[in-house]
Image (cartoon, grey):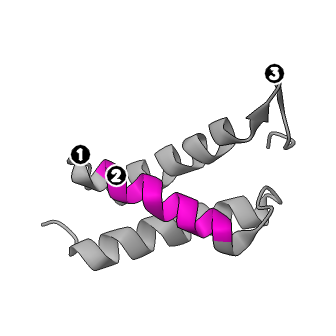
Amino acid sequence: MTEPLPSLLKNSINIAADYLQRSGEFDNPEADCRRLMHWIAEMVRNGETRTMVLANKAIDEYRRSKVVDGYREFAPA
């Protein structure tokens, strides 16, 4: 049984945001959560419905977006 769409989005965003916040990688939580929501919604539109896959891919996309001039702006966990 699949999770209802609002719960799927909320849970995926919460998991990714909580991880990034606890790891100290969030620069601006409000803006960063909007970016996570954008990426997760796009993956859902493309058919992904697994909460942890959505959260993990959003974390990866967040980290990729932080790559500047060949180096990362965060300390890897």
Residue 58 x, y percent position in the rendering: 51, 50
User: Vertically, is 70 above or below 21?
Assistant: above
Residue 38 lies within the magenta run: yes
Measuring from the top left, give residue 18's x and y in whole percent: 65, 69
Q: Looking at the picture, which amino acid does disc 2 mark?
A: Glu
Front residue of 73/69: it is 69
| Mark 1: few/some/many CA within 10 Å (<14, 14-19, 20+) | few
Q: Residues within 10 Å of mark 2 (few under 14, many from 20)?
A: few
Overall secondary structure of the magenta section: helix
Specify whether 75 is left or right of 62.
right
Asked which quadrant contains residue 31, the reply is: bottom right
Q: Earlier in the sequence, mark 3 or mark 2?
A: 2
Identify the residue under disc 1.
Answer: 46
What is the CA distance from the residue labelled 3 to the residue labelled 2? Answer: 26 Å
The mark found on residue 70 in the picture is 3
Determine which of the numbered discs, if any, sits on residue 42 in the image.
2
Write the residue at 65% across / 40% down.
65
Q: Are marks 2 and 1 in contact (CB under 8 Å)?
A: yes
Magenta part of the chain: 31-43
